[in-house]
Image (cartoon, helix red, strand yellow):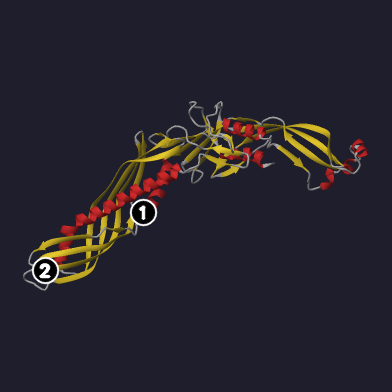
């Protein structure tokens, strides 16, 4: 069947059951469960860690008074975060926003150190340099964001964020014995603050990047030369203690049409729930209302996209009057050895009825038999056909089955 009809039927595979809501709600509902939020959280944390690792922190320098040594100018440079291990994380939703917490994380840093000492005891001064490693043993990170509808796109706002280093240890490679105590006493707090500031900066940059990505999402998705799908968001996301619900317009529109509110009856629908296995908790549920299908069928029908000329068949002889001379002798007698084609057209918008269990589609088709004689197309017969199809859709580990067709 042609792409316009095939799309309408194949799109039934991406659905699940849903009930009607207010007129301001969309016709496609997306519910992300706590399982889905955990999955998204893990991906975001992995990307955040990847962006932080190999980051270099600002140089730190101090002049400290060392007993029996004098004034020592100590400089820490090339401070690099080499590794971060996230041991525990959680994400929670509520009316105020989405909260993500990372606790008990560890981080490994490396740095170069150098110092110079000047005192009246050592007028010529002394200096030394070397390397050190830092182990952050308890890193806590938290942030809270919310989502708002902004003219059909999603706006991500950072409400609060924080990063706290609770404990770190320093291992000195080389250097005098007094230097270790100086690093611990005078620089541990500075190193912790530098780590906290670097991670907080990355959080802000990451939220800004994610916000730009969300706002760059298209409001329409072109499907072919005729139709596009209106995927603009409707109203603000609804946050509960275990899920996020998004409402999308979901109606078909012409490629060149301006997006305006459309009035459709919100009937029933179907939904698809995706998980990582047959018995695993569902991560996401997508619900399509009946009006989505009706808007598509009406659009393709009014655009005259449900008409096809069939002039080729596997058995091409069937499209010649000679093949029908014994079955319909009058046709062969009037048009001997003339080619034919089939003009197939849908006479009215396909009637699509959706319940929470199946989908029924009634398609009224006129098949006109044309004879091609001396460059003229002559209609000789018309057959009206009603195609009644009922489809039951089941989802098992993201594999689709069509148990029966009537």
Which quarter of the picture shows residue 100?
top left
Task: Estimate the x, y position of residue 8 in percent, counting from the top left.
Answer: 62, 37
* CB atoms of marks 2 and 1 within 8 Å: no
The numbered dot on residue 3 is: none
> Of marks 2 and 1, which one's residue comes earlier in the chain?
1
Query: The C terminus appears in which quarter of the rendering?
Result: top right
The numbered dot on residue 49 is: 1
Is label 1 in a helix, a strand or a loop? helix
Residue name at image x 77 percent, y 35 percent? 367
Q: Is residue 24 visible?
A: yes
Task: Estimate the x, y position of residue 405 in percent, counting from the top left.
Answer: 67, 36
Task: Estimate the x, y position of residue 97 in percent, counting from the top left.
Answer: 35, 37
In this view, the residue farthest toward the left is: 120
Q: Is residue 333 above or below residue 201?
A: above
Q: Is residue 52 above or below residue 74?
A: above
Task: Estimate the x, y position of residue 374 in percent, counting from the top left.
Answer: 87, 42
User: In this rendering, would 173 be left or right of 207?
Assistant: left
Residue name at image x 18 percent, y 64 percent? 74
Q: Is residue 241 above or below residue 79?
A: above
User: In this rendering, would 390 be left or right of 34?
Assistant: right
Residue under numbered circle 2: 118
Is label 2 in a helix, a strand or a loop? strand
Q: Nearer the viewer, residue 379 or 28?
A: 379
Q: CA distance from mark 2 to mark 1?
A: 42 Å
Residue name at image x 36 percent, y 42 percent? 91
Q: Residues within 10 Å of mark 2 (few under 14, many from 20)?
A: some
Query: The N terminus appears in which quarter of the rendering?
Result: top right
Q: Is residue 282 visible?
A: no
Q: Nearer the viewer, residue 120 or 258?
A: 258
């Amino acid at each position: 069947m042609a792409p316009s009809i095939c799309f309408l039927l194949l799109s039934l595979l991406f659905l699940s059951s849903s009930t009607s809501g207010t007129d301001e709600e969309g016709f496609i509902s997306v519910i992300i469960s706590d399982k889905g939020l955990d999955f998204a959280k893990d991906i975001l944390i992995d990307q955040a860690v990847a962006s932080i690792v190999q980051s270099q922190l600002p140089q730190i320098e101090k002049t400290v008074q060392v007993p029996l040594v004098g004034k020592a100018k100590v400089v820490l440079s090339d401070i690099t975060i080499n590794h971060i291990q996230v041991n525990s994380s959680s994400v929670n939703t509520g009316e105020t926003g989405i909260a993500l917490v990372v606790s008990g994380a560890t981080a490994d840093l490396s740095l170069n150190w150098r110092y110079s000492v000047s005192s009246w005891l050592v007028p010529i001064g002394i200096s030394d340099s070397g390397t050190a490693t830092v182990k952050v043993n308890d890193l806590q990170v938290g942030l809270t964001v919310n989502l708002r509808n902004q003219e059909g796109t999603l706006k991500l706002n950072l409400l609060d964020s924080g990063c706290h280093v609770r404990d770190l240890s320093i291992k000195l490679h080389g250097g005098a014995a007094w230097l270790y105590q100086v690093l611990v006493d005078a620089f541990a707090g500075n190193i912790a603050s530098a780590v906290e500031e670097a991670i907080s900066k990355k959080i802000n940059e990451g939220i800004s990047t994610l916000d730009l990505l969300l706002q760059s999402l298209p409001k329409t998705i072109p499907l072919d030369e005729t139709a596009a799908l209106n995927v603009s968001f409707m109203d603000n996301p609804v946050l509960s203690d275990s899920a996020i619900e998004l409402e999308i317009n979901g109606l078909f529109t012409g490629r060149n049409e301006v997006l305006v509110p459309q009035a459709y009856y919100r009937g029933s629908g179907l939904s698809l729930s995706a998980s990582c296995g047959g018995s695993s908790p569902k991560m996401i549920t997508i619900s399509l209302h009946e009006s989505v299908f009706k808007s598509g069928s009406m659009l393709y029908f009014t655009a005259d996209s449900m008409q096809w000329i069939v002039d080729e068949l596997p058995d091409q002889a069937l499209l010649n009057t000679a093949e029908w001379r014994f079955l319909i002798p009058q046709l062969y007698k009037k048009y001997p050895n003339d080619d034919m084609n089939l003009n197939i057209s849908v006479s009215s918008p396909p009637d699509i009825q959706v319940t929470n269990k199946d989908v029924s589609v009634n398609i009224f088709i006129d098949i006109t038999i044309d004879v091609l004689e001396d460059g003229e197309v002559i209609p000789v017969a018309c057959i009206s056909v009603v195609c009644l199809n009922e489809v039951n859709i089941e989802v098992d580990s993201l594999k689709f089955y069509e148990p029966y067709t009537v």
